[in-house]
Amino acid sequence: MGVVAFFSVANLLSLARVPLGALFMIVWGASWGGMSLAIGVLAAAALTDVLDGMFARRAAAARLASAGVRSPRLHPHPAGTGSWLDPICDKIFVATVLVAIWTHLHPPLSLLALILAREIAQAPLSLVYLAVPTLRHWLHYDFRASLLGKAATVSQFAAITAIVLELAAARRLAWLAFALGMLALGDYLLRALRLGLARSRT
C-alpha cells in the first residue's frame, strides 16, 4: 500500500483519535480546560469513529465499482489498512482516556475493568496470533470491525462519558460495554474459525 492510500480520509479520521486521547488528558487537567472541553473531545472522537467507517465504505465501494464488481457485499475483497488501524486507534484512545479518568476521579478499578474487558481478553489472543506464523497463514484474518464490535465501542464511549459526568448510569453502561465486548470477541473468534476452515478446504 502506498503512502497516499495509507493517508486516506478514513485512516486520517481513525488516526485522529490518538492525539484526541492526549488532548483529553490535557484539557481536563488544565485550568483553561475542564469538564466541558473534555466532553467535547469525547464527542469529537465519537464523530471520527462514525465518519471513518462511512468514508472507508465509500472508498471500498468505489474501488469495487471501478473493478466491475456489481455486488460489493458478496465480493471477498480483503480489507485494507483501516480494518486493523481503526480498532487499534479505538483501543489507544479508550486506554488513554481511562488513565486520565483514573488520575482525576479514582473510580473503582472494577468499573474500568468492565469497560476494558474486551481489550484485556483480546490482548493474549492477539499476541498468540502474531507470534505463530502457521496460525497467521491458516487464518489470514480479516480485522474489519463487525456491527457487534462497533456497538461495543459505542457502549465504551457512553460508559466513559457517564463516568466523567459522574452519572448513576455509569455502572450499568460499563456492564453493557462488558457484555457487548464479550459478544464482539466471540464473534471475532467465530469469524476467524470460519475463515480458517474455509481456507483449509481450498
Image (tube, rainbow, N blue to C red):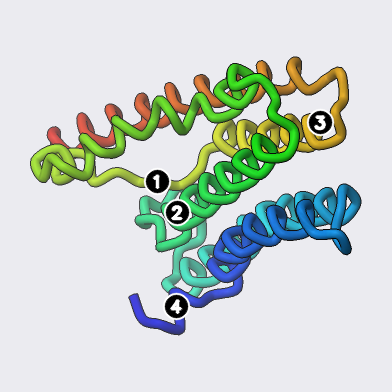
Which residue in the protein does label 4 denote? Answer: 5
Q: Are marks 4 and 2 in contact (CB under 8 Å)?
A: no
Q: Are marks 3 and 1 in contact (CB under 8 Å)?
A: no
Which residue in the protein does label 3 denote? Answer: 162
Residue 190 position in % (x across, y down)? 36, 25
N-term mark: 3 or 4: 4
* Few, some or many residues within 10 Å of mark 1 (<14, 14–19, 20+): some
Residue 137's image quarter? top left
Q: Nearer the viewer, residue 18 or 179?
A: 18
Q: Are marks 3 and 2 in contact (CB under 8 Å)?
A: no
Residue 144 position in % (x across, y down)? 45, 47
Q: Secondary structure at mark 2?
A: helix
* Few, some or many residues within 10 Å of mark 2 (<14, 14–19, 20+): some
Q: Is residue 22 left or right of residue 123?
A: right
Mark 3: amino acid: Ala
Distance from label 3 to label 2 (Cα)?
28 Å
Q: Are marks 2 and 1 in contact (CB under 8 Å)?
A: yes
Residue 114's image quarter? top right
Q: Nearer the viewer, residue 60 or 192?
A: 192
Q: Which residue is drawn at the image coordinates 69% and 31% (left, top)? A: 155
Is residue 202 something one can see in this rendering?
Answer: no
Which residue in the protein does label 2 denote? Answer: 83
Q: Which residue is drawn at the image coordinates 51% and 64% (left, top)? A: 60
Which residue in the protein does label 1 denote? Answer: 143
